[in-house]
């Protein structure tokens, strides 16, 4: 597997990142351990999680994903084989949210304890905090880098104006700078990232780690009618993609997949991996078969004609 540098860091990551939101949600601890073992076996070394995962599950409080990963680290002894990304900022409870210095320094210790490690490879601001001065946030991250608790920092869910301001503050004040951005980006959801953010990331050498890389499963092709959504946990989310444009994208994916003896999901991920600035789309799986289908995208090489057809269908 060919690995990629994660922005201006020394971190080498696989061209796909595994989304740890499934640990403690759609995968229990035993199934999560099996999946983590398989990821290590297949060389998929980049795992993205967050302190808030998976608080939305009834009975959960947040931290479940990090806890499972930490227990796997202890059992497997494979911490050094993993590039571990986690996040801070989303609400975990009363007075447990945001990007203030005090909260970041507290939250990182909680994450390190759950993860049973003494460092985090990539620590990300999960959501912008308009209340806390960005200088304060970046100074806290800078402290963590100097202490060796964090190896790189990134931003998630930041718009172009706020990301540009943060980068300027880092340059002006000699503070640590965001090396990555985690935005919503896929073959359907293009405008929000491509128009304002992609040029900024190219200019500053920021590596992009995309979430909802398959549009909540829509780009796999298994949701083509309203009837297909019944009984699925993400049916309400996927429904918004069932538009004329969405069906046009699926038709283009079908054509390209047929030409390569591949699948719509692999084609959609291959398109994403070929985009400027994209280092690793985030993907999730709950079975070996699903994981194999996603990994197939790594070796899929789209032609210029393939990419043009997909660009046109999703324009």
Image: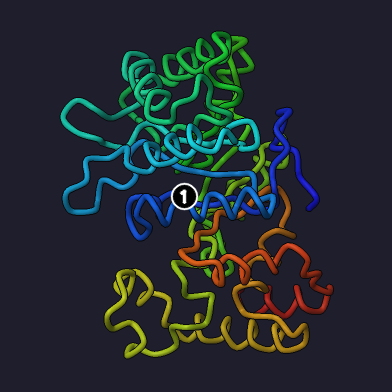
Quarter of the image for residue 204 reads: top right
* Image height of 173 relative to 220, above or below: above
Secondary structure of the residue carrying numbered label 1: helix
Q: Which of 170 and 13 is in front in this view?
A: 13
Task: Please determine whether, in this image, residue 68 is positioned above or below residue 305.
Answer: above
Residue 268: percent from left, percent from top:
63, 71
Which residue carries the number 1 mark?
Answer: 33
Left or right placement of residue 210 versus residue 113 in this view: right
Name the residue rendered at 81%, 69% in the picture.
Answer: 301
Q: In this view of the protein, which residue sits in the foreground, 162 or 117?
A: 117
Q: How crowded is mark 1: few (under 14 residues within 10 Å), some or many (20 or more)?
A: many
Between 116 and 216, the one nearer to me in the picture: 116
The vertical placement of 246 against 144, above or below, is below
Q: Which residue is drawn at 33% across and 82% down?
A: 229
> How are the residues colored?
rainbow
Residue 144: x and y in percent read 51, 14
User: To which quarter of the image does residue 241 belong?
Assistant: bottom left
Q: Residue at x 51, y 86 (%)?
A: 247
Return the residue found at the far right: 304
Coordinates of residue 292 in the picture (x, y in percent) = 63, 68
Please provide percent x and percent y for residue 220.
53, 77
The quadrant of the rendering that contains the C terminus is bottom right
Q: Residue at x 43, y 52 (%)?
A: 32
Image height of 172 relative to 71, above or below: above
């Amino acid at each position: 597997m060919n690995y990629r540098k994660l922005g201006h860091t020394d971190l080498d990551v696989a061209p796909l990142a595994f989304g740890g939101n499934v640990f403690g949600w759609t995968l229990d601890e035993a199934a999560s351990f099996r999946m983590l073992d398989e990821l290590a076996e297949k060389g998929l070394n980049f795992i993205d999680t967050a302190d808030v995962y998976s608080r939305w599950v009834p009975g959960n409080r947040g931290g479940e994903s990090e806890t499972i990963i930490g227990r796997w680290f202890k059992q497997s002894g494979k911490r050094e084989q993993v590039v571990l990304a986690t996040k801070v900022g989303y609400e975990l409870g009363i007075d447990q949210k945001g990007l203030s210095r005090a909260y970041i320094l507290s939250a990182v210790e909680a994450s390190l304890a759950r993860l049973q490690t003494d460092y985090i490879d990539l620590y990300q601001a999960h959501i912008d905090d308009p209340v806390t001065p960005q200088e304060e946030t970046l100074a806290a991250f800078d402290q963590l880098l100097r202490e060796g608790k964090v190896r790189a920092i990134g931003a998630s869910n930041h718009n172009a104006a706020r990301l540009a301001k943060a980068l300027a503050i880092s340059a002006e004040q000699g503070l640590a700078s965001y090396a990555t951005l985690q935005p919503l980006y896929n073959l359907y959801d293009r405008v929000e990232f491509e128009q304002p953010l992609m040029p900024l990331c190219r200019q500053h050498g920021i590596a992009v780690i995309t979430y909802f890389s398959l549009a909540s499963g829509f780009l796999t092709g298994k949701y083509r009618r309203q009837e297909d959504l019944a009984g699925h946990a993400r049916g309400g989310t996927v429904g918004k993609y069932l538009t004329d444009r969405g069906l046009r994208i699926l038709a283009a994916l079908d054509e390209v997949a047929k030409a390569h003896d591949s699948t719509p999901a692999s084609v959609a991920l291959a398109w994403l991996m070929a985009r400027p600035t994209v280092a690793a789309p985030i993907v999730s799986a709950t079975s070996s078969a699903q994981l194999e289908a996603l990994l197939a995208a790594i070796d899929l090489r789209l032609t210029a004609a393939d990419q043009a057809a997909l660009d046109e269908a999703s324009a």
